[in-house]
Amino acid sequence: MTELQVQVFGTRKSKETRAAERFFKERKIKIHFVDLKERPIAKGELTRFVQKFGLNALLDLTGKAYERSNLAYLRTTEDGVIAKVIDDPELLRLPLVRAGKHLTVGEDLEGWKAMLAGS
């Protein structure tokens, strides 16, 4: 059995991201943290989440960044929205967590437990 490694995409100030980090650290799971404020998420990586959950499921529709972005009123393509999200990670429901083929969005305790079970 290979050792489970998770990739956590988030920001330091996101309490949900910190919850994910704490969850995996408490279980001694190796974390590769990607701070989206320092390094934007790769389009291919983001597309993987979009394909699984759909773009709207990734957006933090109640957040201030979404309100500021006027995305609710803009007529734009999915690629246009993806470009905005890459520029402004606060538009996302953080964290995005990946362990192999297992993906979760937001604070998802059940999803994280499933990652551990499926490793």
Image (cartoon, grey):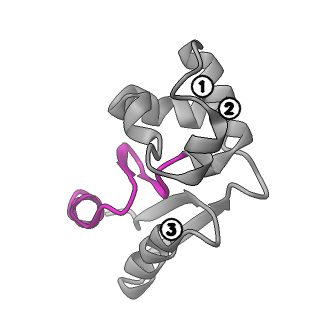
Residue to which mark 2 is pinned: 84
Q: Which residues are magenta?
A: 92-119
Q: Residue 81: which disc?
A: 1
Dot placed on the residue nearer the N-terminal end, 2 or 3: 3
- Distance from Cα at disc 2 to Cα at disc 3: 20 Å
Residue to which mark 3 is pinned: 17
**Badge 1 vs badge 3, beta-carbon distance below 8 Å:** no
Name the amino acid, label 1: Val
Where is residue 103 shown, x and y percent of the image? 37, 47
Look at discs 2 and 3 and give the one toward the viewer: 2
- Distance from Cα at disc 1 to Cα at disc 3: 22 Å
Tell me the quarter of the image containing the C terminus: bottom left
The residue shown at (57%, 29%) is: 71
Q: Is residue 22 magenta?
A: no
Tell me the quarter of the image containing the N terminus: bottom left
Where is residue 64 shown, x and y percent of the image? 58, 52
Q: Picture quarter containing residue 107?
A: bottom left
Determine crowd level at label 3: few under 14, some 14-19, many 20+ residues with C-alpha closer than 10 A. many
**Badge 1 vs badge 2, beta-carbon distance below 8 Å:** yes
Q: Secondary structure at mark 2?
A: helix
Q: Secondary structure at mark 1?
A: helix
Q: Secondary structure at mark 3?
A: helix
**Badge 2 vs badge 3, beta-carbon distance below 8 Å:** no
